[in-house]
Amino acid sequence: MPKKVLTNLDLESMIDTSDEWIMTRTGISERRIIDDGENLSDLALRAALNAIEDASLKPSDIDLIILTTCSPEMILPSTACLVQDKLGLANTPAFDLMAGCTGFIYGLSVASQFIEAKSYENVLVIGADALSRHIDWTDRNTCVLFGDGAGAVVLGSSEKGGGILANYLAASGSGSSLLNIAGGGSGSPCSSDSFDPSSNYLKMNGSEVFKFATRVLPEAVEAVAKRAGLKLEEIDYIIPHQANYRIIETAAKKLHINSDRIINNIERLGNTSTASIPLALEEIYREGRLKAKDKIILVGFGAGLTFGANLIVWEKD
Ligand code: UT7
């Protein structure tokens, strides 16, 4: 996570909002914002190095890098290639994957296919976003929500029978206008005559995305559990994308799941987009709450619109 903290009180002095509104409507109290001198690949590199070290590996042991993001450092080349270079690697394949805030779920699914096919042994999957660089700091509908960060995992093969048991991926492109950053792409290129700087901002129809999220989150959880042949009572933790604590609570009610099994760390980080799930996973791992054989569902939703889930059996002690 970047060091710089932006609190609700800071936002009160910038726009017409209040700590009370933000806390009660979203559950967010503060978020981290990337420093001026830093870039997305710097955040992603730090997360990658932590994950590689925790897996008792060296960067040269990594066979493939998948970086999921909604805010690539450049349109071209991929941020994954920038991270590959910063890791000191020469020929390791690397690519970006864009699936909105569901990116990390898609990334894990893709990585697990490569491992199952025995194409690669150690796959680094990074979820990294710096959406603060796309925020209109006068738009109170979005600027109170997002924070920056990166999280990473190394996936490898295992003989112990755990790992990723099932994936469920879905998309609903008809909702593409509900959450987007329209500018800078080939449909709206940067040129001094035509480029509208406000098209660089993230725009969201919050209430429509809220309705979508509360519908698809339980749907994806149930679908991935069914694919793995497990009942929800057998799941130890659900780690949802951290977009709004009310989305998480509504989903918990629909699923009849006690909220202590649903991880919620939005208060200190805000919505870190593709980084929110790996950051929450890292948090409960670091706190010693995970034990071998725990069954965990990771579930995301976001721009696209996309949604999906992975069901993992944790193996690391
Ligand atoms: O990761 C990508 C996925 N993103 C999401 O899942 C986000 C989903 N959406 C949400 O979490 C919620 O819709 C929001 C938090 C964005 C908004 O909450 P809401 O309860 O849906 O509020 P609203 O948009 O219906 O607005 C209610 C009122 C409006 O005022 P009026 O028109 O009723 O007078 C807004 O102008 O709250 C006002 N408002 C604010 N007031 C103070 C909106 N933003 C703010 C604010 N501070 N920051």
Image (tube, rainbow, N blue to C red):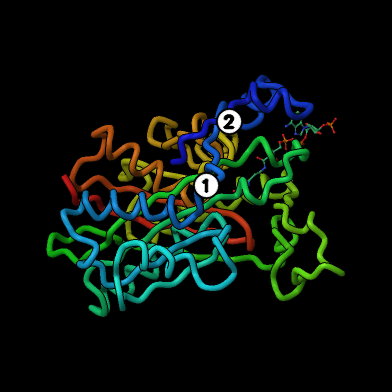
Of marks 2 and 1, which one's residue comes earlier in the chain?
A: 2
Label 1 C-beta lies within 8 Å of the nearest ligand 1 atom = no
Q: Which mark is residue 6?
A: 2
**Regarding mark 1 in the picture, which secondary structure is present there?**
loop
x then y, percent, for residue 185: 69, 70
| Left or right: 262 in relation to 117 | right
Q: Quadrant of ligand 1?
A: top right
The residue depicted at 53 percent of the width and 42 percent of the height is 35
The answer to whether one can see residue 24 in this image is: no
Q: Amino acid at mark 2?
A: Leu
x then y, percent, for residue 253: 53, 36
| Closer-to-camera residue (316/123) | 123
- Label 2 to label 1, Cα distance in Å? 17 Å
x then y, percent, for residue 303: 63, 58
- Name which quarter of the figure residue 160 lies in: bottom left
x then y, percent, for residue 94: 39, 72
Which residue sits furthest front? 37
Which residue sits furthest right? 193
**Regarding mark 2 in the picture, which secondary structure is present there?**
strand
Q: Which mark is residue 205?
A: none
Give the quadrant of the C terminus.
top left
| Residue holding disc 1 | 37
> Crowding at label 1, few (<14), some or many (≥20) Cα neighbours within 10 Å?
few
Q: Amino acid at mark 1?
A: Gly
| Closer-to-camera residue (152/211) | 152
The answer to whether one can see residue 137 in this image is: yes
| Closer-to-camera residue (2/242) | 2
Q: Is residue 137 above or below residue 231?
A: above
| Left or right: 56 in relation to 235 | left
The residue depicted at 74 percent of the width and 64 percent of the height is 183
Label 2 C-beta lies within 8 Å of the nearest ligand 1 atom = no
Give the quadrant of the N terminus.
top left
